[in-house]
Image (cartoon, rainbow, N blue to C red):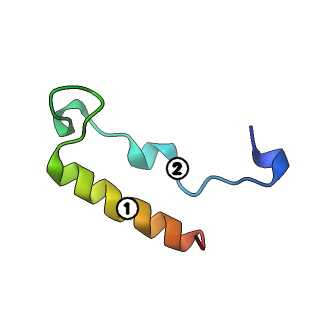
Amino acid sequence: MLLPYGYVPIYKVEDYMYKGRYFFDSDYHLNDLVAALRTEQLIKDLKAAGV
């Protein structure tokens, strides 16, 4: 929706979708291991986007 305004996605949504077993006690809290992996992936994507 924001592409016409010059905003581009920095990653594919599919890259940040995790299976239920990677969550702690609910679908909203990643467990420690996957939270660290997601953070590393996000940093990599931000750097690649020049942020």
Q: Quadrant of the N terminus?
A: top right
Asked if residue 29 lies left or right of residue 41, the reply is left
Q: Name the front one of labels 1 and 2.
A: 1
Asked if residue 41 lies left or right of residue 51, the reply is left
- Which secondary structure, mark 2? loop
Which amino acid, by three-letter code, is at mark 1?
A: Gln
Looking at the image, is mark 1 or mark 2 earlier in the sequence?
Answer: 2
Is residue 43 or residue 15 the one in the foreground?
Answer: 43
Per the image, the residue denoted by label 1 is 41
Which amino acid, by three-letter code, is at mark 2?
A: Lys
Q: Quadrant of the C terminus?
A: bottom right
What percent of the width, then of the height, locates residue 24? 16, 34
Task: Name the residue rendered at 42%, 60% in the picture.
Answer: 42
What percent of the width, then of the height, locates residue 40? 33, 64
What percent of the width, then of the height, locates residue 41? 37, 61
The reply to whether the C-beta atoms of the residues labelled 1 and 2 are less than 8 Å apart is no
Q: Residue furthest top?
A: 26
Up the image or down, 19 lies above or below 3; here it is above
Task: Name the residue rendered at 16%, 50% in the picture.
Answer: 32
Per the image, the residue denoted by label 2 is 12
